[in-house]
Amino acid sequence: MYDIIIIGAGPAGITAAIYAARRKLNFLVLSLDIGGQMSWSSDVDNYPGLPDLPGVDVVEKFQKHMKDYNIKVKQEEVINVQKKLRTFVVKTKKFSYEAKTVLIASGKKPKKLNVPGEEEFLGKGVNYCATCDAPLQKNKILAVIGGGNSALDAANFLSKYAKKIYLLDVNSKLGGEPVLRDKVLKNKKITHIPGVKVLEIIGEKFVNSLKYIQNNQNKILKLEGVFIEVGLVSKADFIKLVKKNKWGEIMIFRSTKSHEENLTSVPGIFAAGDITDIPAKQIAAAVGEGCKAALAIFDYLNKYKLS
């Protein structure tokens, strides 16, 4: 019987685990990866004290902190969370675990385009993680699909390796943060193609072209790789117990009487980070939410004499 089961090992989950370790609670961390979206970032320059570091380096520092407290992550995929009287059963594809409280910090995953060729050529020219696969793109012609911050970041990072990058954007005007937008517009390797709808990813053994429509005209773009950066979807399909908004984000509530924050609609289940409906999707915000959630869980355990 665990005091807490933490689902997810991104910045929110890691922070909560460190707080739990400091309180010497009996807890378990379940996650298929460590770092979450943080590890996809080419450059993290807005986290206090760690300026201008690649995301993977920031994750390394978080992992070092976890190691200092002997925190281990069980790499298992959670498929269900069930209530059992006053406790909870968390089921993975391998085992079942029981806990007095659950913290969901599972974050988000890349959204798919859902066009022909996307599934067929996954790993054969279709990619969702620029920082993971950029070193394999040396001197290639690539397309980055998207117009938000993740697409701009991916295009800038890939330009360090690729020969040419086409940024295909559904919007008529380039969006994203001004700093990232300026970098893209100044980068001679990147060509922005606005007002685009991608129709199909084409190839034989590997991707070799992409079909899109612009100004009511079908066009073919010859290339060697496609990076899909059209947003993220919530990783909360495994839990049906709690209330979610229309985007599948877990709704969290504040109890001013008990000072318990990051509460879901089910007492004993808490949530933190990008999986929740808080508007700020940032590493610093996720760390703060993980801290708040951990403190709220400690209060909850003590209040109901569960610890």
Image (spheres, rainbow, N blue to C red):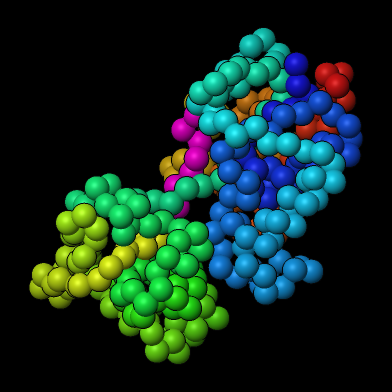
Residue 176, percent across and down?
A: 47, 73
6 w.r.t. 121: above or below: above
Residue drawn at the location 68% of the way across and 50% of the way down: 11
Q: Residue furthest left?
A: 217
**Exactly how many numbered labels are in the figure?**
0
Question: Is 96 on the left or on the right of 182, as rendered?
Answer: right
What's the residue at 21%, 65% (across, down)?
208
Left-right relation of 244 to 19: left
Q: Would you place residue 94 above or below residue 170 in this image?
A: above
Q: Position of residue 33 (x, y in %)?
A: 58, 43
Dividing the image into 4 quarters, which one contains the N terminus? top right
Residue drawn at x 51%, y 23% is 93
From the viewer's side, name the closer residue of 100 and 222: 222
Q: Which SS does the magenta portion mostly show?
A: loop
Percent position (x, y) of residue 257?
81, 35
**Residue 233 on the magenta span:** yes
Question: In the visual, does 305 lie left or right of 101?
Answer: right
Most extreme residue toward the top, as rendered? 85
**Residue 148 falls in image quadrant:** bottom left
> Can residue 202 be seen from the camera position used here?
yes
Magenta span of residues: 231-238
Measuring 58% from the left and 49% from the top, which residue is drawn there? 36
Magenta stretch holds residue 89: no
Q: Is residue 141 above or below residue 225?
A: below
Left or right placement of residue 294 versus residue 224 in this view: right
| Residue 295 appears in the picture as rendered | no
Q: Nearer the viewer, residue 289 or 221?
A: 221
Is residue 244 or residue 289 the one in the foreground?
289
Quadrant housing the C terminus = top right
Task: List x then y, in percent, for residue 188.
Answer: 40, 89
Tell me the quarter of the picture where residue 162 sits.
Answer: bottom left
